[in-house]
Amino acid sequence: MTTSLVWFRDDLRVRDNPALLAAAADSAAVALYVLDEESEGVRPLGGAARWWLHHALEDLRGELDRLGIPLLLRRGAAAGIVGGVAAALDAEAVYWNRRYGGPERQVDAEVKAKAEEDGRHAESFQASLLHEPWRIQTGQGTPYKVFTPFWKTVSELDFRKPLDAPEPTQRFRGRLPESEELDGWELLPRRPDWAGGLRKAWTPGAAAGHELLEDFVDGALADYPQGRDRPAVRGTSRLSPYLRWGHLSPFQVGHAVAARRGANHGEAVRTYLGELGWREFCWHQLYHQPLLAERNLRPEFDAFPWERPGRKRSGNDGGASPSGRNANRGGPSAAARVRAWQRGRTGVPLVDAGQRELWTTGWMHNRVRMVSASFLVKNLGIDWRVGEQWFWDTLVDADAANNPASWQWVAGSGADAAPFFRIFNPLTQQAKFDPEARYVSRWVPEYASPEYPEPIVDVKESRQAALEAYQALREDN
Ligand code: FAD
């Protein structure tokens, strides 16, 4: 009997999993998940993500059990652990599905080098993106910086059909290396247990993901081009955490949606695939710009006078920043503005509704994400990285590429960003996309009562101040 090790990461599923298929093809497969909080540069998971991961691993263990494949859990720097477990198993081969972040690629390269040095076969597969980021290039052979031409190229390419789960013929019968207890990882919040709303809103795992996908293609997909902008209705698929954790692959989602092309769903299918295209584009950016969550893609924004609580204003000290003006008028400090935004107490109903939805359920509707992010960065004058980190900590779909790329898009500092001067007005956005205030009253029931506070900043004045700060930045550059 030969043994293969399959190393699970952001691909917590047994169907459409090429690494698992390879491992189970003609050897006894053993699965491993490593909670890596030690490798240099690997971003530690946020709180909501840790909650999701706990349940996701329970689900994966159940799915693997049914295939007779044991799952080992270990914590530590992945490179050493994968090598050690492969050696303890005397595995012939180590398989995994590729990841695209900089530090993760570094770890994977180390694992590969070590496996080969030890005489093991090491192989990785494409499983979480429809197209490998290095394959998609402009006519000049450079990475794309703008979505429209990227999507024009990508949308013309076919992507493979999803693969079935393996049907293992061999089982591992030897002595398994040590595995840790999932409960011992303390991924679930205890004192206080803030996850009640998450439990109500979500069932992590592949079966729940497939159910949602089926419901969506049979229902909301038909009206997706309009419904997707209405936060009060279930107009979007809510598949983002399932894609983030790999309970579903983009191949499974893409094919299920594309299969509805007929029956007048052509435009809906195109629009939805375009959103999967944005996901691909965000990962394309992260692959080529590993510091996407840390650095402005447009360096001229390094001089923008955004504020971060506890830090002096970054960039020039022009005083024309929204925050500078605010401070001059004795308005709330940066820390107070951030706190009000995080807690959904800014006095701006759509922003507060979104932030409360996020805090309660670990998810926020896309339209509201855009409005709320724009309000933090442009009206409250706060550095986008502060908001990005908050989303990273609170979203169940917190994604290493989608999150920073979207924040940079909103902030104007991204490669293909909305121009800075296009500032969402949260009040007109509410009038347009939540005209009967159904969404707002769901999350901010007191919004029409005297208890509801005045806006923390004047929406018009703060917008004007942001534009002036931007103008000053342009004149200086
Ligand atoms: P649907 O409308 O059903 O879209 C289907 C899928 O396409 C999504 O599940 C997602 O995987 C992908 N997608 C949709 N819109 C985008 C987009 N604009 N960019 C990239 N992929 C997209 N998405 C995340 O998955 N993780 C994040 O951490 C994240 N952070 C965001 C932060 C900000 C400030 C903004 C404005 C957007 C962010 N998004 C993020 C993108 C988007 O808001 C979510 O993907 C979407 O709301 C998820 O809901 P859904 O699955 O119902 O989307």
Image (cartoon, rainbow, N blue to C red):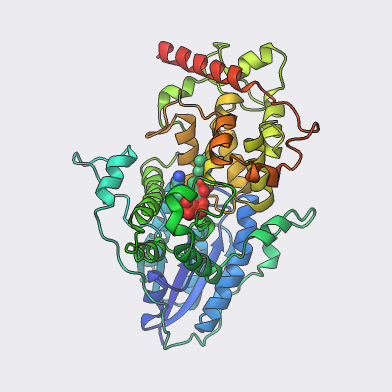
**Is 470 or 456 nearer to us in this picture?**
456
- Rendered location of residue 200, percent (x, y): 68, 61
Q: Is residue 295 visible?
A: yes
Q: Residue at x 54, y 32 (%)?
A: 374
In the picture provided, is 18 more to the left or to the right than 199? left
Q: Residue at x 41, y 66 (%)?
A: 96
| Quarter occupied by the C terminus | top left
- Rendered location of residue 445, percent (x, y): 74, 43
Furthest residue toward left: 139
Residue 431: quarter of image: top right
**Is 245 or 374 nearer to us in this picture?**
374
- Rendered location of residue 299, percent (x, y): 41, 26
In the picture provided, is 364 more to the left or to the right than 127? right
Relative height, residue 349 to residue 253 (above, below): above
Relative height, residue 176 to residue 310 (above, below): below
Q: Residue at x 39, y 40 (%)?
A: 289
- Rendered location of residue 165, percent (x, y): 42, 77
